[in-house]
Amino acid sequence: MILCSGNPEDKTIASGVREIMPQCDFASRATGYDLRFWDKGSEEHFRKHIVDYDIFINSSFICGGGQLQLLEACHSEWSTKGVKGHIINIGSSAEFIGPTNTLDEIYGKYSIQKRALRDRSLQLSGVNSIRTTHMTLGGINDGKPGHEAWLKPIDIATNIKWILEHELDIKQIYIEQSYDDNKTTMD
């Protein structure tokens, strides 16, 4: 059973996952999950239900280290209950923005959170027979202006499916759309 964070009604990774893996369930406020964990009940709800799954696609960026909290909660619950699952953590090419980069003012906290997610994902890989994969993406075409040449949600989902089905334990992968700077859309 697969649980993916995000609302598949929006143009997100979750929408691509729904298209490629229609048997997947989704965790978002629209489906009764508040993944921000602002109150104790929301975290308890996630922890109670995550043990019903053996694949978790941690795809929604949540300010304040929310993705890292989801990774920790999922890994902890699966370890306690003996679930030998696979967690896919979605990172960003912003992980490579350093503290002295001029973009730091805009992306500083975001890049730090994505690096922390990557580092912890790699630390937990294989612990208690739980696989973790950190997928660094070079932009998602979410329909916003300027994002047309970035990765389509369906292509990201296709790669997630490939990772899940692959015989090797893929701990980290980087995917970025190659495009011509003179084009505004992909063919």
Image (tube, rainbow, N blue to C red):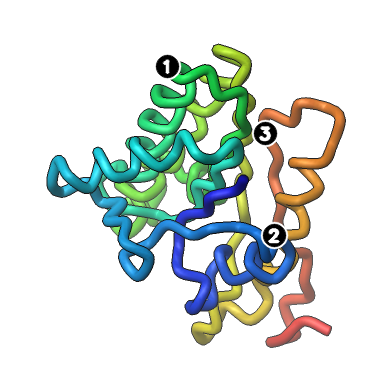
Sequence order check: which comes first, mark 3 or mark 1? 1
Q: Nearer the viewer, mark 3 or mark 1?
A: 1
Indicate whether 7 appears above or below 97. Answer: below
Q: Position of residue 180 (x, y in %)?
A: 78, 75
The residues bearing labels 3 and 1 have C-alpha atoms spaced at a distance of: 25 Å
User: Which of 113 and 86 lies nearest the eye of the viewer?
Assistant: 86
**What amino acid is at disc 3?**
Gln
Residue at x 45%, y 62% (from the top left corner): 6
Amino acid carrying mark 2 in the image: Ala
Q: Which mark is residue 157?
A: 2
Q: Left of 39 or right of it: where is 159?
A: right
**Number of numbered labels in the structure image:** 3
Expressed as whole percent of the image width and height from the top left, the position of residue 184 reads: 69, 87
Compared to residue 49, the image places residue 6 above or below, namely below
* Quadrant in the picture for residue 170: top right
Helix, strand or loop for disc 1: helix
**Quadrant position of the C terminus in the picture:** bottom right
The circle drawn on residue 34 is none
Q: Nearer the viewer, residue 56 or 54?
A: 54
Mark 1 neighbour class, 10 Å CA radius: few under 14, some 14 to 19, many 20 or more: few
- 7 relative position to 148: left or right: left
Residue at image mark 3: 172
Mark 2 secondary-structure assignment: helix
Q: Is residue 99 left or right of residue 167?
A: left
Q: Are marks 3 and 1 in contact (CB under 8 Å)?
A: no
Amino acid type, label 1: Thr
- Numbered label attached to residue 80: 1
Q: Is residue 155 visible?
A: yes
Say above or below: 10 vs 145.
above
Crowding around mark 2 (Cα neighbors within 10 Å: few <14, some 14 to 19, many 20+) is: many
Distance (Cα) linking label 3 and label 2: 16 Å
Which dot, 1 or 2, sits closer to the camera?
A: 1
